[in-house]
Amino acid sequence: MTSEQHARSFGSAVDAYEHGRPGYPAAVADWLVPTGAERLVDVGAGTGKFTRTLLGRGAEVVAVEPDPAMRARLAALLPDVRAVDGTGEAMPLPDRTADAVTFAQSWHWVDPEGGVAEATRVLRPGGVLGLVWNVRDESSDWAQRLGDVITRPEAQRMAYDDESAVGGPFRTREHRVFEWVHQQDRSAFLDMVLSRSYVIVLPDAERAELRRAVEELLDSHPETAGNETVRVPYRTHVHRYGLRA
């Protein structure tokens, strides 16, 4: 199973993705978006999890998403957002028309060289490229055990702590981590697990076995047994790159 197949798998699990995936702290967008921004572009937007945090912070928000099922769900949920077909390497937008281009949970699917070149083309001088990753905080015993159950060798590597992830003509490079807790009911939590690309592409029997293992962990661990909601701690890594004016 190739990285491309993993990247294109999300549309087949659009319901689980929208139901289970967490959003992002408003403070992330507050820090990323330049003052007085007009056009904000969210790339690899999925069903609009990060797109929502950009609303109201610019005169226009454009969502770029290659998967038609994901894009259709985003358009239905966020009718004020212009949703277009495209990728990090090919955005259907004019040169120098965006004040910020963001990749939330999507940069690891992009060819870095092509993505930097395209973001540079689309951004206005002084604009911001933002890379965002929600990463589960596995410092507690329960979170560590969850990671042991669901992580697979074929999971896509996310370079969320790599300060050199982006080259090109960016004059400033900053990295900040936002710690927060996402609370969701049991069914949403299970959908969060099932919406991961390497789980989506598993054979049905293996996916069902993984779900049973997660349910057993929820039922047996003191931190989660008998609880109606599941508290999932996150550390959201945010990289902000400022384009030379």
Image: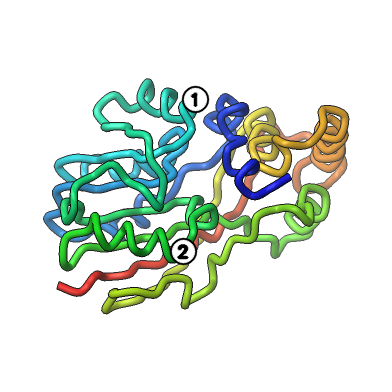
Q: Quadrant of residue 1?
A: top right
Q: From the viewer's perspective, is residue 234 above or below residue 217?
A: below
Task: Say how many tags the image has.
Answer: 2
Residue under circle 2?
A: 112
Please name the residue shown 27% across and 63% down the image: 120
Residue 216 relative to residue 76: left or right: right
- Place of residue 203 in the rendered image (x, y in percent of width and height, measured from the top left): 82, 32
Which disc number belongs to residue 240? Answer: none
Residue depicted at 38% across the width and 46% down the height: 43
The answer to whether 169 appears left or right of 160 in the picture is left
**Which amino acid lies under the numbered mark 1 shown in the image of this protein?**
Ala
Classed neighbour count for the residue bearing mark 2: other residues with Cα under 10 Å, few (<14), some (14–19), many (≥20): some
Q: Residues within 10 Å of mark 1 (few under 14, many from 20)?
A: some
Q: Quadrant of the C terminus?
A: bottom left
* Residue in front for this viewpoint, 63 or 187: 63
Q: Nearer the viewer, mark 2 or mark 1?
A: 2
Relative depth, front residue between 179 and 161: 161
Image coords of residue 233 (percent x, y): 60, 54
> Residue 56 at x, y = what percent?
21, 41
Specify the color scheme. Answer: rainbow
Residue for badge 1? 69
**Which residue is rendered at x = 61% and y = 28% of the image?**
13
If you read the primary sequence from the N terminus, does the residue marked by circle 2 or circle 1 appear first?
Answer: 1
Locate residue 229 relative to residue 75 in the image: left or right: right
At x 54%, y 57%, the residue is 108
Mark 1: secondary structure: helix
Q: Is residue 179 above or below residue 188?
A: below
Q: Secondary structure at mark 2?
A: helix
Give the Cα separation between the discs numbered 2 and 1: 25 Å
Above or below, 158 relative to 211:
below
